[in-house]
Image (cartoon, grey):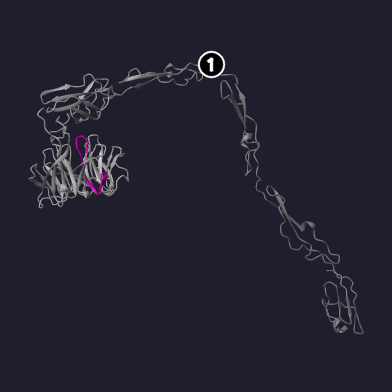
Amino acid sequence: MEMAAVQCLITCGKQTCSPKCVAVNFNTENATCELLSAQPNSTSDPHIIRDDEWVLYTEKRLKVNGGPGTWSAWGACSTTCGDGEQTRTRACDNPAPAYGGSQCNSSDLTDTRSCNDAECPVNGAPGTWSAWGACSTSCGDGEQTRTRACDNPAPAHGGSQCNSSDLTDTRSCNDAECPVNGAPGTWSAWGACSKTCGDGEQTRTRACNNPVPARGGSQCNSSDLTDTRSCNDAECPVKPGPPGRPVVSVLNDTANVTWTPPQDDGGAKVTNYNIEMRRSDNYTWMLVTTDNDIPGNNYLLRGLTEGVDYELRIVAENEVGTGEPSQPSEIFKIVTVGKLKSSPTVAKRQLKSSEIYETYDLAVTSRGHIVVTGGSNTKIYASDYSLIKDIGERFYHVTVTSDDRLVFTDSSSTIYFYTADGNYMRDITVTGSSYDLRGITTLSTGQLVVCDGKTDRVYIVKQDTGNATPLSASGTFEWPLYVTTNSKRVVIVSDRYGHSIKGLDQDGQVLFSYGTRGSGEGQLEYPRGVDTDKEDYIVVADASNDRVLLLTPDGMFHSYLLTESDGLSYPRAVWINQDGHLLVGDKNGQLFTIIYRENGKYNTITYSRTTDFE
């Protein structure tokens, strides 16, 4: 390094020293010329060094060439993708040029490099349209299409695709009208069936009008314009089956015959019924309704002969012909009807206390055997009151069916069936609830009618299943206890706590009511047993008043048949036997027989379980 001329002037205290070069950071405090002259030459920058009293001026001028300093950080890239560039710089400060020294080369102070050299995304754009495609129809309103690719340019490096709507173009073509092919229209209604029964056929048609063929279009196939189907394929009617077995009730010389329609009418309406009769004095079945059409289910047969056994059967007719006959009715005969006596004849029998000490109910079989329930016993007596059998069960109420079966209740939900000789057959449990079954009787249909002390209602019960249907509405009775029916199927019930007798039709409607609580005429107190004779007169056991009443068929008072003066005590059970005699049982085990018609015979119809005609 070249040294310039140096002039040193220093005043040290009051001394002036000869020129010397001063060392860097020389401290002039208490400096002396000797000390100053002892300092070596310095190549440092000139300094002015001061203290409180002295000033040392030192000036040195040496040439210092500049040198590059430290690089800065790289600057931002000039692009976000593609070929970019970034720069860094440094100062000419290591050292900085001085005392005439040279500057740094500018090329040494700036540096560049490439950056972000990844490819930039290229967004796709549509190319050239293709030729138009074929028309979608050969006539009418058609459409054709052309397309172009997304290739001008194709999308690359994540660039966006073209919009699909920009790549397809459509236009109308072939708008001339086309031929119209005919098609079938709406079907007509089906025509009449070719037969009224059996395998018939019916047809329907339609026109070729949906649309009508036009401009050379094709016609409909004829097979598409006609349709057939089977009809009336049900079997043709045949003769009807047999009606139900007829039921006969007789008044004087006239028989009222009723029956149920045949279960199978043969497929056609029954238009007439014929009644055939067979007599014990003529062995042949004879038609008795030759001049009459009988569209209904009942008929009055007049002019019958007293003392002759009769059977009837019913034959149904329809449009095809006459069907099979019904089963014959039970054998019946006409007997003289006695007038009501002004003063009934009364006979009394005391049953032994060991046999029956308290009568609850009684019934008489077709053989005249008397069935009595009471206390802990149920016994069967002959018509001369001799004991036939002790059944050995405690039952409360009893009735006899049309086929001479004994039917009992015991204040439970069970009904018991016995033969007329007192042998157990079967029992059924009445469905639907828990019951306190009491009085019981039968309808001409074979169904049972029974009173229930829990619901205070009367029920119709099927013998085979035990299914129960209420007959009386709730509230009709306070405690229905005994029940019977008459020839018109009116159900007559004694209401013990209602102190009355009520007659119900088969719909449960009250037809008549007799009695209020008391002992006068028109009054009852705790009535019990009830029965009807063949003219539908009603016999009632007026228990607490110790008397038995006869009411007219419509429930009006007629007369007293038995009273306390006859020895009667709290009558419970009543029954009218085949001879028209009234039997009454009371709480003391007494059995009364009352004849209240003039000739002692009341029944206008008697039944037999066997026949000599078969």
* Circle 1 SS class: loop
Residue nearest the viewer, comparing 46 with 473: 473
Q: Read off the residue under disc 1.
A: 214
Left or right side of 330 for 498: right
If the image is split into quadrants, where does the N terminus sit? bottom right
Residue nearest the viewer, comparing 453 with 21: 453
Residue nearest the viewer, comparing 346 with 388: 346
Residue nearest the viewer, comparing 541 with 48: 541
Q: Residue at x 85, y 73 (%)?
A: 46
Residue interval drawn in magenta: 519-537
Q: Residue at x 77, y 58 (%)?
A: 109
Image quadrant of residue 55? bottom right
Up the image or down, 145 lies above or below 404; here it is above
Instruction: Count residues near mark 1 (Cα–Cα under 10 Å), then give few for <14, some for 14-19, many for 20+.
Output: few
Up the image or down, 549 lies above or below 67; here it is above
Magenta highlight on residue 322: no
* Amino acid tagged 1: Ala
If the image is split into quadrants, where does the C terminus sit? top left
